[in-house]
Amino acid sequence: MAKELTPRNENYAQWYNDLVLKADLAENSAVRGCMVIKPYGYAIWEKMQSILDGMFKKTGHSNAYFPLFIPKSFFSKEASHVEGFAKECAVVTHYRLKKDEATGEIIVDETAKLEEELIVRPTSETIIWNTYKKWIQSYRDLPILINQWANVVRWEMRTRLFLRTTEFLWQEGHTAHATETEALEEADKIINLYADFAENYMALPVIKGSKTEEERFAGALDTYAIEAMMQDGKALQSGTSHFLGQNFAKAFDVKFTSKEGKLEHVWATSWGVSTRLMGALVMAHSDDNGLVLPPQLAPIQVVIVPIYKSEEEFARVSESALKIKEELENSGHSVKFDVRDTHKPGWKFAEWEMKGVPVRIAIGPRDLDNGTVEIARRDTLEKQVVSKDSVKEVVGGLMEEIQQNIFKKAFDFRTKNTCRVDDWEEFKDIMKNRPGFVMAHWDGTKETEIKIKEETKATIRCIPFDSEKEEGKCIFSGKPSDKRVLFAMAY
Amino acid sequence: MAKELTPRNENYAQWYNDLVLKADLAENSAVRGCMVIKPYGYAIWEKMQSILDGMFKKTGHSNAYFPLFIPKSFFSKEASHVEGFAKECAVVTHYRLKKDEATGEIIVDETAKLEEELIVRPTSETIIWNTYKKWIQSYRDLPILINQWANVVRWEMRTRLFLRTTEFLWQEGHTAHATETEALEEADKIINLYADFAENYMALPVIKGSKTEEERFAGALDTYAIEAMMQDGKALQSGTSHFLGQNFAKAFDVKFTSKEGKLEHVWATSWGVSTRLMGALVMAHSDDNGLVLPPQLAPIQVVIVPIYKSEEEFARVSESALKIKEELENSGHSVKFDVRDTHKPGWKFAEWEMKGVPVRIAIGPRDLDNGTVEIARRDTLEKQVVSKDSVKEVVGGLMEEIQQNIFKKAFDFRTKNTCRVDDWEEFKDIMKNRPGFVMAHWDGTKETEIKIKEETKATIRCIPFDSEKEEGKCIFSGKPSDKRVLFAMAY
C-alpha cells in the first residue's frame, strides 16, 4: 500500500480511477471498453444482487433468461427504440473462423456469414416482447412479472470503469399488464424499491422523479429515475423504471382477451440497475484514504489485525482473535482475521482502509494483558480501546452507526450543494465553478432544455415527484413555469 | 393439462422435448439455437447455482467477471485450444448499425468495422490467462482460485433445449498454482465436488474418471469428468475438471518467482458445469406424467390444493391450508397454496405432477371433518391420508425419503444397464439394441477408439478412477489391456 491515491480536490476523476484499481474492484481488460471485475469488486456486486433479488422476489417477480442475441430486424419494430439503441451495438455477422491456408493465421470464414445479423443485446425489450407474444392470450396470463440478471453491450466511445463500459452487468425487469393503471403502479413500485435499496443499503440519498421527454428511455412513455449526488457535485442516474405504455405490445403485436372478452394490447414496464451502482457507491462515500463501504454492502465487515513480534506472541494473540472472530460471526458479521506474515500491521491497516472495511480490530500483547482491543472505524477513522468482553456490543452498534453516518454525510453534502436558482447568470456560474443540484424553473420545452445543455452542459436530471407547485419563470426563456425541476452536471 | 406427453418407450427424444416445454422449463427462441429459460426452469437453475456457489466458496474460491468478448488473436496462442474452439464461434465484426438512406432499412454500418474481430467467448481460458499475467509475479500471488458465472456461445448445428444450445449458462473456474501437485489436487477436488453435488442434490449417480486424449478439453493435459446414465441408457457428461498443466501459462507468458527465487511458469486448472445439468436432471428422473424433481432442487417442495364447492367451503379449507403452509414453511420447506379459481383440482393435480413438485397435499371439507389431509408423493404417485397434526412430520420424512428413493432408482437402473463385455459382437449388439454402460478392455490407442466410434457410435466416456487393474484384451483389437474403460452412447 505504498502508493497513495490522487487526492479528490486535485483531480476527482483520477482519484476515482486510482481507487477502483487500488481497492481491487476492477480493471480494464484487453478488450476496448470492457472491464474485468475483480473478486473484491464482484463480492460487493454480489451483495447488491442478493439484496435486490430478494426485494424483487418479495414483490412477486421471478427470474428468467432470454437470449444474448437479438435479430437485427427486431430493432426496427419499435421506431423510437431503434433510434436510441441500434447505433451503438456489437454486431455478429459470422459464425465460424478458419485457418488461412496461405498464412496459417486464424481468419473469419466468409462462407459462414449469417443471413440476418445478430445484435448483442443492449437491452432486451424486443426479444422479450417477441417471446411474450407466445405467452399471452388471455387476461389470465397477466400480469407477467419477470426479471433477468444479464450482461449487455452498448458500444461506448469513452468508457470509465463501472460508470460507462461497453459490456456491463445489470438486471432488467420486463412486466406485462392488463391495464394502464397496473403498469403505472408497477413502474412506480419499482422506482420506490430502487430508492429504498439506494438509501437503506447503499446509504445513498436519491431524488426520485420523471425524466423529460428528451431524456426518456427510447420507446418509453415515461421514465422514472433515481438521481444521486457524487462528491464532485455531479449527478449520477442510479436506476430507471420505464412505463412503456402499449408501444412494445403494438410493435410485437401482443394482444390479450380481457375479462370483458375484448382483444386489447398489453401494457408494459421495464426497469433496471447495473454495475454502474458500483461507481455510485465508490464516488459517493469514499475519501482520500480509499473506499468507505456501508456495512450493509461490505463483503468484509470487520477485519482483525494481529500485532506481534514473536511466534509465541502470535499464538497468544491468535487465540484471542479467533474467539472474537467466532463471537462476531455468530452475531451475523462477516469477519476476516488477517494472518499474513508477509506484511506488517501498518501496511495491513492501510490496505483495509483502502478497501473500505467498516471496522478494524487490532490486538497486540499489551491488549491481552489489559483484556482490551483497539477498534477503528473506517468512516471517521476514529479509534477506541474497549474491553474484549464488550467487542460484540460495540461492533454491533458501530455497524448501524456507520451505516447511518455514511448516509447522513452524503445527505448533508447534497443539502449543502443544492440550491434554488432564479437567475441565469448564477445558474451558469454554478454549473461552471461549483456544480451541484440546482432547482430551477423550466418552460417545459425541448428547445429550452437543449439550449441550456449546449450553453452549460447541465441537463434536467428529473422532475422530482415531490416538486411543489410554484408559479415562476423559466430560468432560460423567462416563460411561465409551475414547478421547479432538477438541473445538474451528470455522469 | 389436457395434452399428454409422448411416452418414453415410444420416443424418448420427443418425450424429453415435450416435457421441457410442458413443464415450463424452457423453449426455443427466435434466435436459432438459443433458448429462453422460463421462470420455473430458471428457479431450478437458481437452486443449482446457489448450492454450487456455496460449495465453491467453502473450498476457498471467489467469483469474478471477465469480458464477454475475446480478441481473435488470443485463440491462436494456445495451439490445441484454437483447434477445439475457434471453429464454432459467434464473430463480432462491426460496432454500429445505420439506416439505409435508400430503403429506410437498418443495415450494418460498413465504416464501423473492427480492426480485430471479437469472438463471443466459448470458454474463457484465453482472456483470463491474459489477465492473470498482470496479477501474478510471485509465489505470494498464488494460488488464484476464481470462478465466474457467465453465458457462453458455441455455434452448434443441431441444438436441443438445455442439452446443446448455442448460448448456454455455466460456471467456469480458473485457478493458478505454484506447483503441478497443487493444480492436480485442485482438479481432483473439483471433480469430487461435482460428484457430491450430482449425487446428493441432483440425486444423480455418477461415474468419475479421466477422459481419453481424444475426448479431452482442447488445451488440457488431463480432463476429469462425471458421467451419468439417462433413462435411455445413454451417457450424459455432467461436469468436467481440467488439469491444464502449464499450457496456458506458456501461451500467455505467465511466470512467477518461486520461494527459491526461480522464474517458473504457473500451473492451471479450469472446470465447469452448465445448464446442461438441467437436461440431466429431467432425463434421469422424470416419467410419462412429467417431471420428477429431487426435493433438494425443487423450487416448490409442497403444493397444497384446496377441494371445495362453495365459497364457504373454500374459506374453511383455506384456513386449515394456510396453517399447514405456515407450519411447513417454518420447517424450511417451500410451499405453494394453489388458490386459482380458474382451474379444477384434477387439472391442478396433473399440472403439479407435470412440474414435478415432490409432495402434494389435498384438503377438502371431509378432511376438515376428519382432521386429516391427503398427501401424495410425486416419485411413486402413492397417496396416504394422515392426521393434520402429523403433516409436518410426514412431509419432513418424505423429503428425505423421496430424495433417497430417486437416487436409488437411478442407481439401480444404472446397475441393471451396466455390464462387462469381452466380445465385440455383443458390444455392437448392446450399443445398437439396448444401450447402456459397457465396461470393456481397450488397447489405449486413439486409432482403436476412433474405429469403435465409427462402427458403433459408442465413445469412451471415461477411464473410471476406480477401475481395477485387470489383465485383458482390447474388445476391438485384441491387444493387451490392463483395465476396463467405460463405453457408452452419449449425448
Image (cartoon, coloured by chain):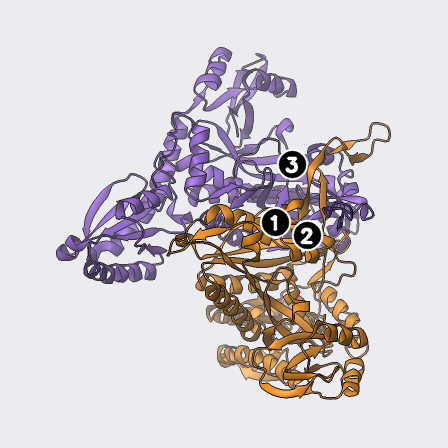
Chain colours: A purple, B orange
Q: Are marks 1 and 2 on the same chain?
A: yes
Mark 1 vs mark 2, CA separation in Å? 9 Å
| Pointer 3 residue | A155
**Residue B50 screen position, x and y as percent:** 53, 62
**Residue A334 screen position, x and y as percent:** 37, 55
The vertical placement of B214 against B126, above or below, is: below
Q: Are marks 1 and 3 on the same chain?
A: yes
Disc 2 or 3, which lies upstream in sequence?
Answer: 2
> Mark 1: which secondary structure?
strand
| Pointer 1 residue | A150
The vertical placement of A207 against B436, above or below, is: above
> Mark 2: which secondary structure?
loop
Type of amino acid at the residue the image marks with label 2: Phe
Mark 2, mark 3: which one is toward the viewer? 3
| Pointer 2 residue | A66
**Residue A296 screen position, x and y as percent:** 40, 49
Type of amino acid at the residue the image marks with label 3: Trp
> Mark 3: which secondary structure?
loop
A388 or B87, which lies in front? B87
Q: Residues within 10 Å of mark 1 (few under 14, many from 20)?
A: many
The vertical placement of B99 against A371, above or below, is: above
Q: Where does the N terminus of chain A fall, quadrant-wise?
A: top left
